[in-house]
Amino acid sequence: MPFPLETDRLTIAPLAHTHAEAFVAYRRDPEVARYQSWGTDYSLDDATRLIDGQHDGRLPMPGHWLQLAVQDRRSAELLGDLALHRSPDQPDTFEIGMTLAPAAQHRGIAFEAVEALLEFVFEQEHAHRVTAFCDSRNAPVARLLTRLGFRHESTAVEADWFKDEWTTLEGYALLAREREAAAL
């Protein structure tokens, strides 16, 4: 099993039942839920179903997601989570997502966690391409993706009916060769 991933400050491993209460607490925060697919009514039952569906924490099969806990390496406090999706249609292609608890934001944790996940999927899983999408109003995620080397690839104007309104989605992508060139 490839997990846990570790950085100087973080441990990244599949979300477990021990994380459920903290996971639900930040998912219920209106600012955290604002641009995400869930609402502030996210429940412990929702978290339990998500964790139970994780295929024993192995890498996702094509078409499936794996939710990864981002924890403080010293205290084991849950700081947020990453989502990893393997494309069902394209080989060596992944999509990522990220969510942080409010107390963990603006500390470089998202950058550190996503960078570790990117290193893993490009170097260990030999990813060809990694994508990410965000609501056009979510400027912090757009900035994060750009800092990580993603290129803005698409704007789908009012293409997503989301939380009772049309929203615009921004698409980002990073190819293995782009990441390698940036490392030189």
Image (cartoon, rainbow, N blue to C red):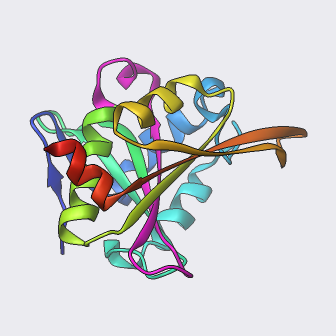
Rendering coords of residue 124 (x, y %):
18, 69
Tell which of 151 and 109 is nearer to you. Answer: 151
Residue 117 seen from this side: no
Number of callouts in the render?
Answer: 0
Could you say which quadrant of the image residue 152 lies in? top right
Q: Quadrant of the N terminus?
A: bottom left
Horizontally, residue 17 falls left or right of residue 13, namely right
Horizontally, residue 77 falls left or right of residue 38, namely left
Rendering coords of residue 179 (x, y %):
27, 50
- Residue under the point 57% across and 51% down: 44
Residue 46 seen from this side: yes
Rendering coords of residue 123 (x, y %):
18, 64
Rendering coords of residue 65 (x, y %):
49, 68
Tell which of 145 and 105 is nearer to you. Answer: 145
Q: Quadrant of the C terminus?
A: top left
Q: Is residue 30 above or below residue 162?
A: above
Could you say which quadrant of the image residue 100 lies in? top left
Q: Is residue 179 above or below residue 139?
A: below
Does the magenta segment cover residue 49? no
Horizontally, residue 88 falls left or right of residue 184, namely right
Tell which of 90 and 71 is nearer to you. Answer: 90
Q: Is residue 105 above or below residue 125?
A: above
- Residue under the point 42% across and 39% down: 22
Magenta segment: 83-109
- Residue under the point 44% across and 70% down: 93
Tell which of 106 and 45 is nearer to you. Answer: 106
